[in-house]
Amino acid sequence: MSLGIRKAVGAALTPSLFLTMRNGYSAAMFLKDLSAGLTVGVVALPLALAFAIASGLSPVSGLYTAVVAGFVMAFFSGSRFPVSGPTGAFVVIIYNIVSRYGYEGLVLTTLMAGVMLIIFGLLRLGALIKYIPYPVTTGFTAGIALLIFSSQMKDFFGLPLADTPPEFLDKWHVYAQNAASFSPATVTVALFTLAVIVAVRRKIPRIPAPVAAVVAATLLVSLTGMPVETIGSRFGALTPGLPEFSLPEGVTFDRIRLLLPDALTIALLAGIESLLACVVADSMTGDRHNSNTELVAQGLGNIASVFFGGFSATGAIARTATNVRAGAQSPVSAIVHSIFLAAVLMWLLPLMERIPLAALAAVLVTVAWDMSGWKTIRHVFQGPKSDWSVMLLTFALTVILDLTVAVYMGVVLASLLFMRRMSDLTQIRGGKAEEPEALADLPLHGESVPEGVQIFSINGPLFFGVADRFQRTLEAMENPPRVFILYLHNTPAIDMTGIHALESFLARRSPDCRIFLADMQAPARRTLARVGIVRAIGEENIFPTLDAALDKAREVIAE
């Protein structure tokens, strides 16, 4: 790579923190960042614990993730406002990976996902990730919400289960078998937590509802001595201290190949959610993020996270919005949030042992409700049938089979439906003098079309979705005309399948048939020139307008 290219890439991927410091960072900005960072840190604390437990991991691993990944992602972020850490989007896939391959499998999967994200950013693929269809993201987000809700029923009702199956239907089958063994005390704490969350959101929206609810539930259990399971009773004493560096184990080629689909899913989810968080921040502040820099930051953060006992992380939309509302000025606020959680790890971790698991389950139930996006789903149902069909398929596959399969199948089906829709929009019409109705839409400003001349109009891209129809229409001509005019006024692009159909027509045409191309757009002309069709037809047979082609056709007929 030349020096100039390296400088250009480096400038394009400069983190927002560096740009902020270069443009001037004042003490007043730091005070606002400090206040916002502490606010977000308080909000992130119960969520980090809850997401780790729901993922089948130790609660401290959630704090490790928020500290390490949150710091690294903020330091290298392509936006000034995102806050990163554990999120609900990863709970389902992490739980499945841990249940199948253990924490070592999760480490390797996250490392591969981190490398993929860095490659996505270096290859400038940030804009492409945004093109994942909206019905697909709506479907798998709603599916994840239902799976998170399902995973919390054991702790919400205090069911006496040592473990629950990862599959959705098996999980509910086990719940139904043990429904009569629920704990009234646990249900009381869970419902109390939900009530506090709802009340705080409605009456005191400035206070973080999950934090207030967890604190209230912890005090209730501590003061009344209610017999409910807590973090300490399930996981034992939590050892204070910062995470320690460790290298991954069990890295083999076979394992890499086995975990590659899950790694790609994590990379896609991390990219989608982090860029959505950036978009939310931009809409709230009027700022503009660098999507490629953000992808690189997400990759570095995920790699660093598993080196220090954490797991997969990404930009958190709700925490990012809280950060903006709290007055954040730069990525320093997200760094302060990580430092606050590091202080909790060092000095306040024993207090976390008293938190009831039912309270965290109630918090995740509200997270699932917020993720479900019922208003969005209702809005999608108002759109085309193909879109809500893709959404339902993605939702069903996420819940019943696997998130990885759901994302891939949803994208593939949405792409196929889009191609069909585009092929339907492309109009292919042919007309000659004795068929005036076929020529009604053509911009004919001179004399009528002479006999022996046929005009063939394409309105839309000539790609593989319509190439077969194009070829069949050409083959259906009973008597080849003396002059065949291909009118390409509204054909922005031609792919190789369309080119092949045109080449087949040229090869089979009668020796007495002249081919004219009229009113080609520049991109289509460049494509036809590169593949040799312009040379085969001849520059003298290419005309800037349909009228010019018709004038020449009249001369040919007169000869």
Image (spheres, grey):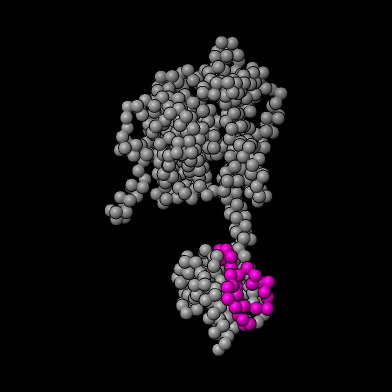
The residue under the point 43% across, 45% down is 291
Quadrant of the image for the C terminus?
Answer: bottom right
Report if residue 478 is visible in the image.
yes
Query: Of all residues shown, which one is farthest toward the left?
Result: 3
Percent x, y of residue 427: 62, 65
Residue lying at 30% horizontally and 38% vertically, measured from the top left = 22
Q: Position of residue 181 (x, y in %)?
A: 69, 22
Quarter of the image where the N terminus is located = bottom left
Q: Is residue 248 magenta?
A: no
| Magenta segment boundaries in residue numbering | 433-462
Q: Position of residue 462 (x, y in %)?
A: 56, 66
On screen, residue 215 above or below 103: above
Q: Is residue 36 above or below residue 144?
A: above
Q: In the depicted view, which residue is nearer to us: 144 or 7?
A: 7
**Magenta segment: does it hold 436?**
yes
Residue at the location (47% across, 66% down)?
522
Residue 307 appears left or right of 6: right
